[in-house]
Amino acid sequence: MDLEFVIILVVASLGLGFLMGRIYHKASGRRSKKGIDTTQQADQQRLRLVLELISNMTSTLIYNRVLELVLDLGAQVLEGSTEANDPKLVSAVFLFSPEGSKTVLRLAVSRHMVQADQRATLPAAGGLVAQVIDSGEPALLNKIKDDPELSQIISLQACSSLYCLPLRVGLDAYGVIFFAHAQADYFSPAQQDALGILTHQGVIALQNARLYNDLEQEKERMMDTQEEARKKLARDLHDGPTQSVAAIAMRVNFARRIMGKDARAATKELEKIEDLARRTTKEIRHMLFTLRPLVLESQGLVAAFKAMAEKMHDTYDQNVIVEVDESIVPELEIGKQTVIFYIAEEAVNNARKYAQAGEIQVRLKRLGQDLAVLEVKDNGVGFDIVQVGANYENRGSLGMVNMRERTDLINGLLRMDSVPGKGTMIQVVVPLTEEAAERLRLRAQAVP
């Protein structure tokens, strides 16, 4: 946890404690000195509990635990008790969740909601929830029965007032949280301010939990990628150099047996062995190049593309034409260049293996001021994208999956066009600036 975050947490905690003090003292009215001392001790105890809950909330990396702590702490703020358990206070967190081609709000955690509401969803198409999501601002509702969506939740039918807050930071929106009570005008301005601070801390904790979950998923993805790379290397070794070495051994044995009987035939056989050994050496060198293209590290992306084309021609007699707008390369950091190279190499290798293409074209060109596009096009047999995508788990190669994942690493957009008998075109739009990356992200979210 960095210093800036600690400062924000302390300030927010003190602000919450101050607001709680206002709530408790306003509700208490005038007290005797002894009563004030007792109240101060109780307030201090509550504040310590609040700080402890906030600390737990911001340190936990379990998504649901964060949400539960937000609801529990909200009850502490509203009820003014360390044993807050008012059955008339209903609270819930609804998070965005895909449902078919749409996105709805689905109940994540709740307090004092009946079993029939545990699978509740909110379309957020109208009413208070839609207002809160669109505006990004909390809102108070005193006529729940008139709301087109909230009135459908059974647990809220006995409530007279509801306060709804967005779970949102910047462009990242998670959903909404609401507290509802049977008492009319239950939520005072001070309570609303306290819930706002609490919700803000909750969103920060949610972000931490999400980052941790993303990190765990990325670790798993990297392990899967490494495992797939090992399997691919094993397949390539088995299908290529291993078979060639076995053939060399058989031919050497044959040449040895005929050497004394037919010197001319033995000489021709040795020439075939020499040619096979040379081709095997080229295959191994090509495999080493794809595993770690040293020319990319030493001379950059353009040289790496040209070296790939040369090795494809020398090793497999595959024609690869490379066209690169070299003005783009200085705008790409070395890590992004490496990813772009591996996407192109994967696409070219797939075309060589499956497309039966006479020619493969690799182009890197500018697309507007802050975008570039990588194109890999072949004139081969093509394929049905939908059919291949549906059966891809049964294929031995994960080339298409690898290209999608690598495109995500550079915040790009991947597009594949192929028609049986008419070749294949693979395009990767590459952002050159952070602003361009954000535009691509928004565009990808807008595509159904």
Image (spheres, rainbow, N blue to C red):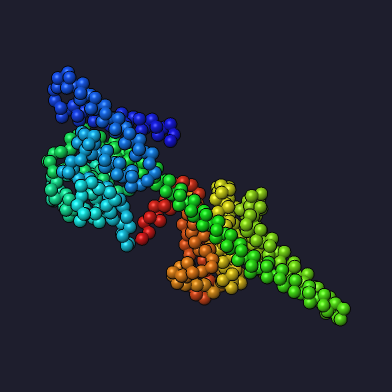
Q: Position of residue 381 (x, y in %)?
A: 54, 74
Q: Position of residue 444 (x, y in %)?
A: 40, 56
- Residue 431 visible (yes or no): no
Give the answer, above or below, for where 430 lies relative to 239. Answer: above
Horizontal side of residue 237 vs 405, given as left or right: right
Q: Residue furthest bottom?
A: 261
Q: Residue at x 68, y 70 (%)?
A: 243
Q: Residue at x 26, y 26 (%)?
A: 44
The quarter of the displayed image where residue 365 is located: bottom right
Between 317 and 107, the one nearer to me in the picture: 107
Tell me the quadrant of the picture where the C terminus can be found. bottom left
Between 402 and 83, the one nearer to me in the picture: 83
Horizontal side of residue 425 vs 298, given as left or right: left
Q: Residue at x 66, y 53 (%)?
A: 295
- Residue 98 visible (yes or no): yes
Q: Position of residue 434 (x, y in %)?
A: 46, 46
Tell me the quadrant of the picture where the N terminus can be found. top left
Horizontal side of residue 287 vs 378, given as left or right: right
Between 211 and 55, the one nearer to me in the picture: 55
Q: Position of residue 322 (x, y in %)?
A: 61, 61
Q: Residue at x 66, y 52 (%)?
A: 294
Give the answer, above or below, for where 370 lies relative to 265. Answer: above
